[in-house]
Amino acid sequence: MKRWGLLHPWLHLALLDFESRSSYSFSVEVSNPVVDPRFLRQGPFKDLAGVRVLILDADEPPRFSRPRYRLDVSENCPPVCSVGRVSAVDPDTGGSANIRYSIDPQSDPEAVFRIGSDSGSITTVTELDRERGAVAQHRPSIGRPMICQPEPLEQQQQQQQQQQQQQVPVAAEGAELFSYRGNDVEAYAAGSAPSGLYQLEVLCTEKDSTLKVYATTTPESDQPYPTLPRDPRVDVTALGRTSVTLAWKPTPTAAQMGQPVHYCLVVNKEHNFKSLCAAEAKLGADDAFMPAPQPGRDFSPFDFAHFGFVPSDNDLTRDRGFAGNKVPRYAAGRPRAPDMVKVCIGDKNLYTVSDLKPDTQFYFDVFAVNAATNTSTAYVGTFARTKAEARPKTLELKDGRVTDVFVKRKGSKFLRFAPVSSHQRVALFVHACLDSVQVQVRRDDKLVLSQSVEGVRQFVLRGKPKAKYVIRLRGSRRGASTLKVLATSKASSKQPFPSLPEDTRIKAFDKLRTCSSATVAWLGTQDRNKYCVYRREVAEGYGEEQRRRQQNQCAGPEGRRRAEKVLCKYFSSANLQKAVTTETITGLEPGKTYLLDVYVVGHSGHAVKYQSKLVKTRKYC
């Protein structure tokens, strides 16, 4: 039978402190008080076990260096007179970098003293006079001491808002009325302020920055900043691979105050912004206050299409529209920050961002902008990741078999080749029939080949046991492409496609041209191949553009008429510099234009066509 022993600290012991001691170690002894006399010689009947107790760290509040401070200050000391300094530390870190000081409003209701939020230095706000009873009330008395509370950094903004709601007394000339440190939106309002010159000092502690300032003498009646609704969040209502639809509740400022308010949207890939000023500083001064473009008037659709802002005709902001057809200077080129775009969309509270990159996280911020005061208020931004692209369909390649592939203009096709597990190499033959194509080969998701192919190309890849190959073919921008692709892991001396020279043009000799014949020449290779020559009469206006459209190198001679065939012959040369063959085409009519084609046929029967050549016989001989 097992019995459990429970360990717990005695109540009269001191509280455990992680900062002073993080663990305790001791031994626990267990014994059998009742022993059977028959087994006395087998003793002792007890055992020892080591126990180590680890103290978990808890988030503790800051602590002052002393529980009570006594500070003295001379009367008639001018405002901003130093009284003293208090200090505290964070027990968790042992430092004071992440704490802030503030005065408990209940202990100093007249706001006679001010404390530095970072330093803990206490100064006077007004001049103190011991003999004047009215002013004497501003001194902290013995029965009601002034309490300074260090606060965590995240609670500082909330404490400042509570202090601003209280009435601020009239300060003496030159006194500091308010101080703030950060990069957020901050406001200061005084219940009573004498006439005079008020000075705002701004110090950039890290790098050059920009800020916007709004000042008014009637804060009670002014509503400079748009008011946010009760739910200030930006919601994602629809999410796709390349688009995100956003919605938010409208600001009540436009309906209640009758002020012109529109919305601006900022999209980037890094983080959300606390203010529109911070977002514009990131974009740059030339991109500030950019309204939604209208194609053909302010921007061309190409300027925004790269990021997904192709607005409709109704998106132009009425309040900040451009007059005339003149394009602004900052609208002439592409944005300097391609991963960040700002667009103002008028008074709509529903917007779809399109043409985004799939499987990418974007951050969205919406700002309500008061066009009359040039001020803005930030909604609670959001972020979303676009859906990944659907896995493309792949075409399986058979070992040693030619496959015909069609690729759309700027499109892609994926091929998959799974050879036998014990292969040592893979030979890939690609025959681009029309325009050039981009070929990428991945072996087990690792890129091993990326080249542009025009004509016939052969690639030899090193094999890997049980490896799978994915071939991606990307079409050109000029037009669609057709290809013949063959992949094999078998060793063979005969190539499936005939070898071609680097130059597949046909040369015509003008001096040897007659009324009934034309002499042409083309390059060969070291391999013995079969060459077939065909001719076809074409119209007088047959040009190079028509010839280029019909330049399909995969179209073999089997589709030609017998009457168009001139001859077939075998040719090869061990010396590539002399691998040139000529042929005279006879039986032509005077003054006619002919299209000449040369086909080279490989051992397996696959034919590749040279570039067609236009020749014209002499009209008079």
Image (cartoon, helix red, strand yellow):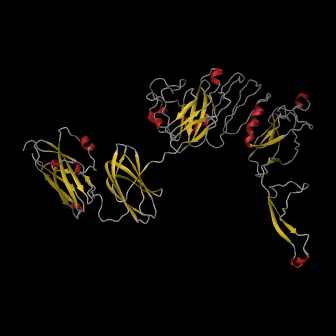
Q: Position of residue 256 (x, y in %)?
A: 66, 21
Q: Quadrant of the N terminus?
A: bottom right
The quarter holding residue 118 reads: top right
The quarter holding residue 201 reads: top right
Q: Is residue 300 left or right of residue 380?
A: left
Q: Position of residue 492 (x, y in %)?
A: 32, 65
Q: Is residue 454 left or right of residue 524?
A: right
The foreground one among 373 and 252 is 252
The quarter holding residue 73 reads: top right
Residue 176 visible at all: no
Q: Position of residue 303 (x, y in %)?
A: 46, 35
Q: Is residue 347 left or right of residue 571?
A: right
Residue placed at 80% from the left, 55% from the top?
A: 19
Residue placed at 53% from the left, 43% from the top?
A: 387
Residue 261 visible at all: yes
Q: Position of residue 98 (x, y in %)?
A: 74, 46
